[in-house]
Amino acid sequence: MVSSRFGRLPDGARDLLPAEAKRKRQLEQGFAQLAEQWGYQEVVTPTFEYYENLVSGDRDDGELYKFIDRKGHIMALRPDLTRPIARMVSARMRHVPIPIRLYYLSHAYNYEEALVGRQREFYQAGVEVLGASGPAADAEAVAMAVEALQRSGVKDFRLSLGHVGIFHSLMKELNLHVEQVKEIKKALEGKDFVKLGELLAARDIPSEKQQRITRLLSLRGGSDILPQAEEILDSEDAMAALKNLQQVYETLASYGVQQHVTLDLGLLLGLDYYTGAVFEGYTLSLGFPICGGGRYNNLLGHFDYQLPATGFAINVDQLLVALEKQQGPSEGPTADVLVGWATDRLPDAVKKVQQLRAKGSKAELMLEPAEYEQVLSYAKERCIKDVIYVKESGVRSQESE
Amino acid sequence: MVAAANFITFAIPKGTLFKPSIKLLETAGLNCDLLKADSRQLLFTDETQGVRYIICRPTDIPTFVEYGSADLGLVGKDTIVEQQKDVYELLDLKFGGCRFVVAVPERRKDSTLEQLGRARVATKFPRVAEEYFRSRGMQMEIIKLHGNVELAPIVGLAEMIVDIVSTGRTLRENNLVPIADVMNSTARLIANRVSHQYKAERLNAIIEEFRNAVTGGLFDD
């Protein structure tokens, strides 16, 4: 009996046909070139690892693809590249002078509800800067994300830049219970501002404190919001975080990319994971973020290597969807030239096609002997512009339409 | 795709939430004459105000908003919880109030939840029900139905139900008694993640109008 799954793909997995694969390859090549120009080195980590290396407090265990190997160890498919890279650097790159700049182009896996461009298997292009704690590293990550998006050809993109340290220090300043902070964080991560309002109102938090939290979270815009934030905050920690954000933002002006970036103190990604500046990128062509990143100074400590770090990842699948919406379907790759041959002339045709390839042409060899007219129609069907025909005596070449 | 760049697109629920939604939009200064005309049209464009309206089933609203086909949506908290979509929940609109309860047949009304142990629960809201029982460490067998849940205990399909109550009449008519509150629900304003960033200025102006209307007592009885 044939299974009902036979011949089908599971939810969240997809094939790329030649035209899509070509566009993806161009994005990858563009990203690799950019990363190398910025002094980054490529790394590759395994697709699956011991579960222990991939799980951490902030991640819902249900998002991981898990399985058990024959020894009974729990394995998981990597949900991102940041954790595997943290493990790898801690285990094998301690002798490397810091900062370490790494980039990757890899699949990652997340068992969430499959959506357009948000696949269970998705392709990430990203970087990590390890061992640098200053604002120049954060600004480098943001500026690089901007340049990567620019090079991809995606239009109308924008980044929001926030800082989770500012929020954390306000929580500390207001001296709320651990439980209260936990619930506030949970509401913020669920983007549930109604719940946030209820929590602030119900938990006998003085209205002055409530207002400070809501005002802080609603600050959004250019550098003019920084003095406003300064009025709301007064602890040393908060001022340091604010100063840090300001330095990052100012450095983005030096890079000439500030016009793509909006400051947003309500942008609070992964509050238990990120520790400093965080950012997310959007384009109007897609209802989901296309890239995200930020500073995570505590992750490598889990692997017993205290190293501050920052980075970002672009979701290449999302980017492909956005590009297809903006530019239409991409054209499939075609050869530059087709070599056809008459009966018994295969050896000469092979020589001819090798010469063409050696000169850098994309040359396709026909696999059966054919009449000249057949060769022309074959080329026309495949949109191959040039045709070379190896006939009984001598070579005939002609351009088809 | 985020709805047309220079427009704000609203997803408006059909059914009982429709009228109060229109009332809110009008109070916020949006012209809803097009929507009030009794037609079967599902999409309205108001060029002068730069607003579009999608009229759809309440259960589909989080989906339209999550994908960005609508920037904003008006929808019940019950639907948001059940669908668990990735959207911003911005305002409690204070209308469309109802509560989720656990109800049992009259003859069992003296039992507590804990006594009912491993029971079968019929509901239209399996996620809400499962979350509720799981948070109490109870393992129930959740049976998903698409309507007329009150029938299930009568014919022995389930021992209890989790359902929405507004007046309580349906329960009474079927000899069911609420024994526990699961949650309260009202209509909420939700927003797409990207629109919330990209169209922040216009969105914030609308959110402010809505907030003023609601805190001004538009839906107070």
Image (spheres, coloured by chain):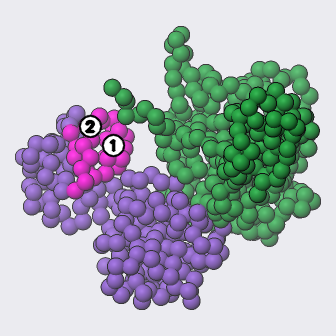
- In the image, residue B22 sits, relative to residue B56, either above or below, namely below
**Which residue type does callout 1 highlight?**
Glu
The quarter of the displayed image where residue A54 is located: top right
Q: Which residue is mark 2?
A: B140
Give the SS element for disc 2: loop
Q: Which residues are magenta?
A: B120-147
Query: In the image, is residue B133 part of the stretch drawn in magenta?
Result: yes
Tell whether A16 sits left or right of B142. right
Crowd rating for badge 1 (residues with CA inside 10 Å; few <14, some 14–19, many 20+): some
Q: Chain of mark 2?
A: B
Q: Which residue does the image show at 63% across and 36% down from the upper left? A: A108
Residue A355, position as x, y percentages in the image: 90, 34
**Which residue type does callout 2 highlight?**
Met
Chain ID for purple: B
Q: Chain of mark 1?
A: B
Chain ID for green: A
Q: Which residue does the image show at 51% across and 46% down from the upper left? A: A114
Q: Which residue is mark 1?
A: B130
Mark 1–mark 2 CB contact (< 8 Å): yes
- In the image, residue A346 sits, relative to residue A112, either above or below, namely above
- In this view, the residue in front, B97 or B25, is B25
Residue A203, position as x, y percentages in the image: 48, 56
- In the image, residue A6 sits, relative to residue B145, either above or below, namely above
Q: Which residue does the image show at 80% across and 46% down from the upper left? A: A387
